[in-house]
Image (cartoon, helix red, strand yellow):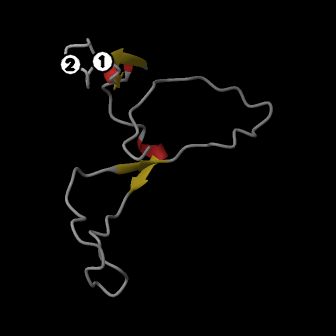
């Protein structure tokens, strides 16, 4: 994933940069490596609103990622690079 730099059209844009997501795959994520992500909407376990201005947004799915990578002797292959909305 590359970083796209802005042209210095204004002083604020001069050092601006954003991530370029064009290299990511357009396919749906692997279903075995996803699980549902429940939203709280700013409410606690009793259902009362405890944080204002929280809620809405796009529906997201949690991706299960093996961060430890401690499986010795198991070959691996990168199938695709996906977008992760939770990171």
- In-front residue for pair 52/63: 52
Q: CA distance from mark 2 to mark 1?
A: 6 Å
Query: Which quadrant of the rendered structure holds the C terminus?
Result: top left
Disc 2: which residue:
10
Disc 1: which residue:
14
Q: CB under 8 Å between callouts 2 and 1? A: yes
Query: Which quadrant of the rendered structure holds the N terminus?
Result: top left
Return the x and y of residue 41 as percentages of the image width and height.
Answer: 26, 68
Return the x and y of residue 61 as percentages of the image width and height.
Answer: 36, 50
Q: What residue is rendered at 31% in x and 64% in y?
A: 39
Return the x and y of residue 57 as percentages of the image width and height.
Answer: 21, 53
Toward the bottom, the furthest residue is 46
- In-front residue for pair 85/5: 5
Q: Is residue 35 left or right of residue 53?
A: right
Toward the right, the furthest residue is 72
> Element type at marker 2?
loop
- How many discs mark residues in the rendered view? 2
Toward the front, the furthest residue is 11
Q: What residue is rendered at 42% in x and 54% in y?
A: 35
Q: What residue is rendered at 30% in x and 25% in y?
A: 26
Residue 10 vertical placement versus 70 (above, below): above
- In-front residue for pair 11/50: 11
Q: Please tell me the numbered disc located at residue 55.
A: none
Return the x and y of residue 68 as percentages of the image width and height.
Answer: 69, 43
For residue 40, what is the image quadrant? bottom left
Q: What residue is rendered at 28% in x and 16% in y?
A: 6
For residue 7, what is the image quadrant? top left
> Element type at marker 1?
loop
Q: Is residue 86 left or right of residue 57?
A: right
Q: Pointer 2: residues within 10 angstroms few (<14), some, or many (20+)? A: few
Q: Pointer 1: residues within 10 angstroms few (<14), some, or many (20+)? A: few
């Amino acid at each position: 994933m590359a970083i796209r730099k802005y042209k210095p059209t204004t002083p604020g844009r001069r050092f601006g940069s954003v991530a370029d997501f064009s290299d990511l795959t357009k396919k749906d994520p692997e279903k075995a490596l996803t699980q549902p992500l429940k939203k709280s909407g700013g409410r606690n376990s009793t259902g009362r609103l405890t944080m204002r201005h929280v809620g809405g947004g796009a529906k997201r799915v949690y991706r299960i990622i093996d961060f430890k990578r401690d499986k010795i002797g198991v070959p691996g292959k990168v199938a695709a690079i996906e977008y992760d909305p939770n990171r």
